[in-house]
Image (cartoon, rainbow, N blue to C red):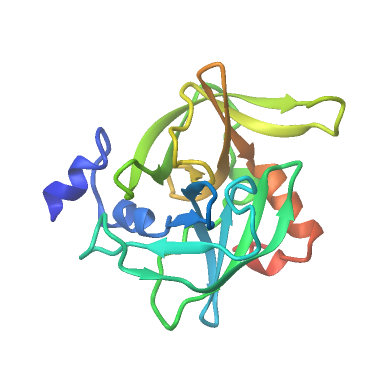
Amino acid sequence: MVSAWTLIMPGVMTSILWTEALLACPRVSVARGPTGTGVVIAVQNEIGWLLTAAHVAIDERVEVAFTSWQSYPDVAWYARQARVVARWPQQDLALVRFETGGRKIPVLPLAPPWARPKRFPAAAWSIGINSEGGATLRAERLEAREYVDDAGKEGVFFWRTAQAPLAGRSGGPLLDAQRRVIGIAVAARASRGYYLHHDEILAALLSSHYKHLLPFR
């Protein structure tokens, strides 16, 4: 088992904490639609809360497929009653609520606002579903915090990374060294990756009364 986890985490020291981070990032899909990744940011009273890209969770009902230590990369179980409870199209962000069925699920919390990178380039890590259906960890280089104004609409802040997310990684998290979420994979442009900025995620949750999902006050 150790060698298998090492192979899916090239260039990064394998640890229980990082492998558990992979288990917090299930496959997210809809009927006759795209397949992407999500990240569990909180579990409260057997209810899980997951962030993903809005262009992945295009329907109200979504399929959320988790793997496990024993089954990786195969599916071990599916979340119950998974549905989109909030969507922010401009930010390409969606929040999914699901029932855990009493299972213990690893959580990757959002980083506090004062902990995000401020100097560039900066190191980060992303998790996303690969072509075999399993979540993998990839080292990223943050190049900048970029403001994108699309066709005259209100602009949005993103992290720009040196490499674009591969197919299936949309909706997956961008993490700091403490395995805290600082971004969500949403786009690629000119071989660069674009992850929704941490500040945009926090603002979206706070504006829609989801403050209880933040691990800080």
Which quadrant is home to the N terminus? bottom left
The residue depicted at 49 percent of the width and 55 percent of the height is: 28
- Rendered location of residue 170, percent (x, y): 52, 41
The residue depicted at 50 percent of the width and 55 percent of the height is: 29
Which quadrant is home to the C terminus? bottom right
> Outermost residue, top direction?
190
- Rendered location of residue 87, percent (x, y): 72, 55
> Outermost residue, front direction?
32
- Rendered location of residue 177, percent (x, y): 42, 42
Instruction: Say left or right for 51 vs 124.
Output: right
Instruction: Say left or right for 95 vs 37.
Output: right
Which of the pair 215/205 is nearer the observer? 205
- Rendered location of residue 45, percent (x, y): 55, 82
Instruction: Say left or right for 47 vs 202.
Output: left
Q: How many marks?
A: 0
Residue 138: which quarter of the image? Answer: top left
Which of the pair 11/78 is nearer the observer? 78
The residue depicted at 50 percent of the width and 50 percent of the height is: 180
Which of the pair 120/213 is nearer the observer? 213
The residue depicted at 62 percent of the width and 51 percent of the height is: 112
Look at the picture and state if 56 lies above or below 116: below
